[in-house]
C-alpha cells in the first residue's frame, strides 16, 4: 500500500530553509521538529477522529502533520506569522481537505466560533510569550460552556506547568493553579528537553492535559469575580487573607474560613465558596 501524501512531505528543516522561517524571539517561537515527539503529543488526544483540533502557533507544521496523521477529523491552524502560513500550504495540499489555516492573532480569535458546535479540542505548542493569557481565555470559555472543548493538550515552560498543577501549601501554588484547577483536571503528561526544539530554549517544557470537570447543578460564580478574588489573595502572598481579602472578609467568615491563613493555604474549593458567597451577598 502506498503511503498517503502526508508521509511524503518535505523534511521540516527543508521547509524552514525554503520559507526562511527562522524562529523569531518576538513571536515566542521555538519550533518542535522531532516528529516522534509531535506524534506522542497528538496521540494524547482522545477520539481524535471525531474531533476538530485547534492548533495555535503551528510554525513549520510538525505537530500539524502529526495531528492529521493521527486521524484528526479536522485541524484548524491559527498562525500569526505569514511565513509559516505559506509553509503550511504544502501540508494543506496533502491533507485531503482536513486542514484549515487561519492567519491571525490567537488572542483575538474565538476558537469556539470556528468549531460550528462540533466536538473540539485544543492541542498546541503555545508561543511562550502569550501562553498564559491564551489559557485564561479558554478557561473563561469553558466556564461559559463546559463542553466548549473536550480537552486541551498544551505545552508550557515547565515552571508555568508546575504552577498550573501545584497544590495548596506550596510556594508555587497561586492564581494559575486555582483558576485552572477550578474548571479542569490538570495533569502533567511529560517533559521535553530544550534539544527537541529549534532554536533550543533555555528551559525544559512540559505538556499538560486539561480535561473539563463535570459539574453539579450548583451555579458557578462569575469568572471575573473569581479571578478578582484569587488575584487579590495572591497579590501579597505572605500576608494573611484578612489583609489581602479585606473587601471579602464577611464572605470568608460566612464560609468559616480562617482569616489568619495565607493565600497559599486555601484550597480551590475554599476560593469557590468565597466567590459564591460574594455573589450571593451581591444578589441579596
Image (tube, grey):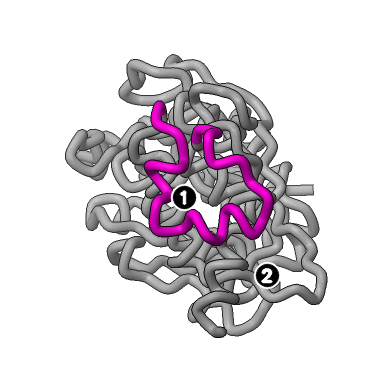
Q: Which residue is drawn at 54% across and 27% down?
A: 162
Position of residue 91 in the picture relative to residue 131 (left or right): right
Dot 1 or dot 2, earlier in sequence? 2
Residue 16 appears in the rendering? yes
Residue 183 within the segment the image draws in magenta? no
Question: Circle 2 sits on which residue?
Answer: 146
Q: Which residue is drawn at 69% across and 37% down?
A: 187
Camera-nearest residue between 196 and 173: 173
Q: Is 101 drawn above or below residue 162 in the view shown?
A: below
Disc 1 secondary structure class: helix
Image location (x, y in percent) of residue 137: 44, 62
Q: Residue at x 24, y 51 (%)?
A: 83
On residue 230, which mark appears? 1
Find the magenta span and give its range. Answer: 238-262
Disc 2 secondary structure class: loop
Q: Quadrant of residue 48?
A: bottom right
Q: In which quarter of the image is residue 266?
A: top right
Residue 254 within the segment the image draws in magenta? yes
Q: Quadrant of the C terminus?
A: bottom right
Amino acid at each position: 500500500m502506498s503511503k498517503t501524501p502526508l508521509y511524503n512531505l518535505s523534511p521540516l528543516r527543508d521547509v524552514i530553509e525554503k520559507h526562511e522561517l527562522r524562529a523569531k524571539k518576538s513571536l515566542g517561537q521555538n519550533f518542535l521538529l522531532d516528529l516522534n515527539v509531535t506524534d506522542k503529543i497528538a496521540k494524547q488526544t482522545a477520539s481524535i477522529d471525531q474531533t476538530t483540533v485547534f492548533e495555535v502557533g503551528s510554525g513549520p507544521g510538525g505537530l500539524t502533520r502529526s495531528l492529521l496523521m493521527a486521524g484528526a477529523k479536522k485541524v484548524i491552524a491559527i498562525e500569526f506569522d505569514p511565513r509559516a502560513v505559506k509553509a503550511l500550504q504544502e501540508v494543506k495540499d496533502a491533507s485531503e481537505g482536513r486542514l484549515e489555516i487561519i492567519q491571525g492573532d490567537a488572542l483575538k480569535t474565538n476558537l469556539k466560533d470556528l468549531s460550528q458546535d462540533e466536538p473540539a479540542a485544543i492541542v498546541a505548542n503555545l508561543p511562550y510569550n502569550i501562553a498564559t493569557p491564551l489559557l485564561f481565555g479558554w478557561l473563561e470559555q469553558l466556564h461559559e460552556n463546559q463542553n466548549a472543548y473536550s480537552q486541551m493538550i498544551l505545552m508550557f515552560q515547565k515552571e508555568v506547568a508546575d504552577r498550573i498543577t501545584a497544590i495548596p501549601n506550596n510556594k508555587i501554588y497561586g492564581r494559575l493553579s486555582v483558576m485552572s484547577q477550578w474548571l479542569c483536571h490538570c495533569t502533567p503528561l511529560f517533559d521535553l528537553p530544550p534539544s527537541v526544539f529549534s532554536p533550543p530554549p533555555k528551559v525544559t517544557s512540559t505538556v499538560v492535559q486539561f480535561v473539563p470537570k463535570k459539574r453539579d447543578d450548583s451555579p458557578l460564580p462569575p469568572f471575573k469575580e473569581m479571578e478578582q478574588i484569587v488575584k487579590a489573595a495572591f497579590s501579597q502572598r505572605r500576608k494573611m487573607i484578612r489583609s489581602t481579602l479585606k473587601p471579602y472578609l464577611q464572605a470568608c467568615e460566612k464560609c468559616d474560613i480562617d482569616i489568619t491563613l495565607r493565600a497559599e493555604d486555601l484550597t480551590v474549593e475554599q476560593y469557590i465558596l468565597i466567590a459564591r458567597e460574594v455573589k450571593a451577598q451581591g444578589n441579596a
